[in-house]
Amino acid sequence: MTASPPHLVIRPIEARDFAAVSLITVESYRPFIRPDDDYFALLADTERRASASEIVVAEVSGQVVGSLTMVEWGSPYADVAQQDELEFRMIAVNPRARGHGVGTALVEYGIRVARARGRSRVVLSTMDVMVEARRIYDRLGFAEAPDRRWHPAISVLTFPLHRGATGQRSQQNSADDPRKVTESRDF
């Protein structure tokens, strides 16, 4: 009997996921941050982050393998979001699950959320040394916004969302709202 391919599900975070998301997030950022950096405490505090933002998890065969934090302008977790933008923060994928489309699926899901909310663009900060993540963003069409760079080693990337011919945001059908369904796919 052959095993079926792993099945990826993206869904809202639940309290039972906090420990796994904390571990995955810290491990994802560990190669890029000094061991004594206070940022690790922020990365590890998933429960607090979930109370002030929206977090979704990627799950394969019942195991959390990644997460995406989405924040609105004005949120205590917003670093670079401007009004009418949705900011992605702390995108993390378990190192053993990389290379299977998990990061891409999380980013695409977040883009659909931003569209459903009528946002003008998605924005995120990324370290220049995060080569794998940068490949995903470049492939999906994110562009650097050099005028918004706030640190020499960190780029701000934006993804403009489509507007109709009149310049107004296109109307989204409520059935297109990704928060109303759990996404799943084989990968």
Image (cartoon, rainbow, N blue to C red):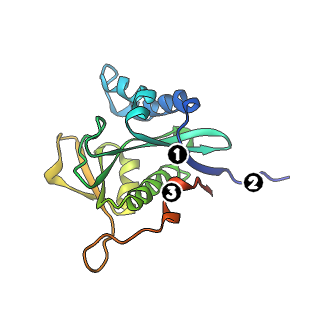
Label 1 to label 2, Cα distance in Å? 19 Å
Q: Which is more N-terminal, label 2 or label 1? A: 2
Label 3, secondary structure: give it. Answer: helix
Q: Residue furthest bottom?
A: 165
10 Å neighbourhood of mark 2: few (<14), some, or many (≥20)? few
> From this viewpoint, is residue 94 visible?
yes
Q: Which residue type does callout 3 highlight?
A: Pro
Disc 3 designates what residue?
178
**Pointer 2: what residue?**
4
Q: Quadrant of residue 58?
A: top right
Label pair 3/2, CB-CB below 8 angstroms: no
Considering only order in the chain, which callout, 3 or 1, is on the residue closer to the N terminus?
1
Q: Quadrant of residue 36?
A: top left
Which badge, 3 or 2, is on the more N-terminal residue? 2
Q: Are marks 1 and 3 in contact (CB under 8 Å)?
A: no
Write down the residue under mark 1: 98
* Residue at 44% over, 30% down: 46
Instruction: Give whichever of 90, 35 is nearer the camera.
Output: 90
Q: Look at discs 1 and 2 and give the one toward the viewer.
A: 2
Relative vertical location of residue 91 with respect to residue 167 in this rendering, above or below: above
Front tag of 3 and 2: 3
**Residue 187: where, in percent of width, then height?**
61, 56
